Image (spheres, helix red, strand yellow):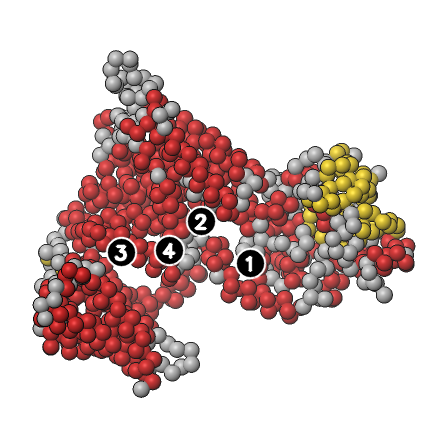
Amino acid sequence: MALLELNNVSAAYGPVRALEGVSLEVNDGEIVCLLGSNAAGKTTTLRTILGMVPAHKGEIRFNEERIDELRTQDIVGRGVTMVPENRRLFAKMSVRENLEIGANLRTDKKEIREDMERVFVLFPRLKERIGQRAGTLSGGEQQMLAIGRALMAKPSVLLMDEPSMGLAPILVEQVFDTIKEINELGTTILLVEQNAHVALSIADRGYVLQTGRIVLHDEAHALLEHPQLSQAYLGELD
Amino acid sequence: MNLVRANFKTGLVGGSVIVYLALVGILERFQDRNVITGVVGLGTTLVLLTMFGTGYLVSRPKDDGTSQPFGEGLVAGAFAGALTAAVVLIFEAMLGAGIQVRNMLVSVTPDLLDLLEFGLGPGLGSVALVAVGALLGGLAGALRLLPEDVRGAINYSLIVALALSLSEPLMDGILRGLGIPRRWLYESGGLTIVGTIIVVVVTAYLRWQWMRRRDQIAETRAHMPEDRRILYRRITLVALVAVLVALPWVVGPFISDVLGTVGLYVLLGLGLNIVVGYAGLLDLGYVAFFAVGAYAMGVLTSTASFLVKPENAPFAEHGFTNFWIALPFVVLIAVVIGVLIGAPVLRLRGDYLAIVTLGFGEIIRTLVLSDWLAPYLGGAQGLIRVPPPPPAALDLRDPQHIYYLILVFGLLAAFVVSRLGDSRVGRAWAAMREDESVAEAIGISVIRYKLLAFAMGAAVGSLGGVFFAAKIGSIFPNSFGLLVSINVLSVIILGGMGSIPGVVVGALVLVGLPELLREFGEFRLLIYGAVLVLIMILRPEGLIPNKRRQRELHEQEELVTVGELVTEEGPA
């Protein structure tokens, strides 16, 4: 059964239509990637799931329950969290404060501490820099912290918006290894990427968005060989 | 030659400052005030200080290492003196020719010229101006050649001596209150010669020792075990409270009254600090909560309130209730109004929020002034006969008594606000202030936390109004103008946004300073404005900044390092 399910969802920014009847599902334990060129509606899809952009048509279900009418904090509280594009850390706060903020909705102090330790196991570099200001971290470390901050909310589905953006190739590989690892530890992942090749290499399935509609949907390895994929990307793949 | 050309301009600026001070009348007016009795008045001190400052400024170390501090200071000081001398000579000539200079420049009196000539007459006086300028400028420059600890000691002792002399009205009262003989230190409004020497030597020595041992002390403190450090912090805290408790009896009723007003501004500042400093919501209508607190308390306790006033008499025997019973209800009313004002502006950010809250502040003032509400709030006549808090035996209207009430609630508010800042709520506010949309994305309920900030700010601010009503005993609409909002905002900006000790220092400077400057009459606001500008230029993060805020203001420097790190790894 699908853990997260979008059914014919449309959304708009004022008069500008951003999503037109998007349907997709993410099953428990999967890594699903959402591909597409600029302005295809990838980020909007994530924001709509989180209730930050209202869905004016269709329905969004999480664990069988409709969440499209809920407020963002309630959706996060149920276990959907986002790692925003460009990291968007609280640059003036320390590493620890950023992690604590991630757990802001939770009240289980002991488990929060355990989860922080878990983040440090995943990213030992963050532990070394625990008191350091987030803005002074390197690009790779910032991405680690952004992921760590989201994990502190104890999500069952993690929405990731372009985690490879602005990182050197070697770091991109590291980040994707980490995503795989987080997935293996039991978190379902919906990944938005421009870097289709790398994303599909770790994903189970993929959807391709074009001007607000899903135009392709298949198993990851099948998508990799699909001729229409390169079209959708205007030649980003060779 | 280069030396002369390079420092010519700054010298002239220094000279212009002296001429300006002379022409607006500050110098002559201030000369009546002794700095060192029988030796030098405040007017002359300002002239000398400007020359010294000019020399000190031009001789600051240059990047290219071509500093010649002594020569630079000497040249600049001499030019400052020369410009002053030139102006003095022009005025002497005009006076000599029988021209009525005072028709144009009212401040140019023979007394003023005499002051500038050091009482030596036009000829010798002009030479003296240049010579003294060169000497002081050169000395200031030469200070740069001294090791840091010695220079610090000299600068510090001069500043302390000047500050002690200027605060004579305050210090005299304190010494009297403590029963310390003061004849050796003060005499007719200024320091005595002996007093000056003692003050300079003692502060210089203490400062020198501190500069030398500073690192060592910091080292010891860093290695101190945690429990020891907590013990020391507790001792400091107890000592601080002891000083605060003893204060009104030491300084007397007048200063106690000023301290009470400072306390009101501390309360208002603490409240606004939640809204602006913590949550980052720029509220320019904060006076609304001050007014709500004062009026709610007034209506509930005044014997002239519509709640109790009999048909045929102006006053009732008792108010509707007493101060202590009313207090929680007043705070509750303020919280409700805080939420009411907060709700419609939730979607607004930054400048827009500021304008709308500004409007709300004015609306509240207009409402209390309106004929419509006049039967309940008194309109322009205000609300009178607000009794002091019971029991009557404590006489809580006396400035020395109500000070304690304000102190207790101030400490309580400071405690609550500081705990709030470090709590989950405080962290959520900080996240919201930094990046509202990300805060929302990670599950922070922006709406709830904004309303909470308005409600908490309103609660603390209303306490300010409550004590204002209790202290003054009557409430008039014109006490709740825009200026109050601006002043409170200035208190927290000056003290350091988001910092609690900053609020206290900010309130002391902004409310206390004008009181101390009272004897300077019409120049009071001029000096006050100049001090504010100077503080903001020299310390944009405020006097006692909040650590996180300080980082925000010095972001520019840090961005460079972040940039370097990013290019190191580079985008793909």
Secondary structure of residue under mark 1: loop
Query: For mark 3, does the 10 Å Cα neighbourhood hold few (<14), some (14 to 19), or many (20 or more) residues?
Result: some
Secondary structure of residue under mark 2: loop
Tag shown at residue A133: 1
Residue at the image point whose x is 46% and y is 57% from the top: B550
Q: Amino acid at mark 4?
A: Leu
Position of the N terminus of chain A, as image quadrant, is: top right
Residue at the image point whose x is 25% and y is 43% from the top: B258
Question: How many angstroms separate mark 3 from mark 1 (CA)?
Answer: 39 Å
Q: Amino acid at mark 3?
A: Ile
Q: Amino acid at mark 2?
A: Gly
Secondary structure of residue under mark 4: loop
Chain designation of label 3: B
Position of the C terminus of chain A, as image quadrant, is: bottom right
Q: Are marks 2 and 1 on the same chain?
A: no
Chain designation of label 4: B
Q: Are marks 3 and 4 on the same chain?
A: yes
Percent coordinates x, y for residue B36 in the rendering? 14, 63
Tag shown at residue B527: 3
Residue at the image point whose x is 30% and y is 78% from the top: B8
Q: Decide: marks 3, 4 in contact (CB < 8 A)? A: no
Residue at the image point whose x is 27% and y is 70% from the top: B14
Question: How many angstroms separate mark 1 from mark 4 (CA)?
Answer: 23 Å
Residue where numbered disc 2 is placed: B498
Residue where numbered disc 4 is placed: B543
Extreme-bottom residue of the structure: B1
Comparing B437 with A159, the one in front is B437
Q: Decide: marks 2, 4 in contact (CB < 8 A)? A: no
Q: Nearer the viewer, mark 2 or mark 1?
A: 2
Q: Nearer the viewer, mark 3 or mark 2?
A: 3
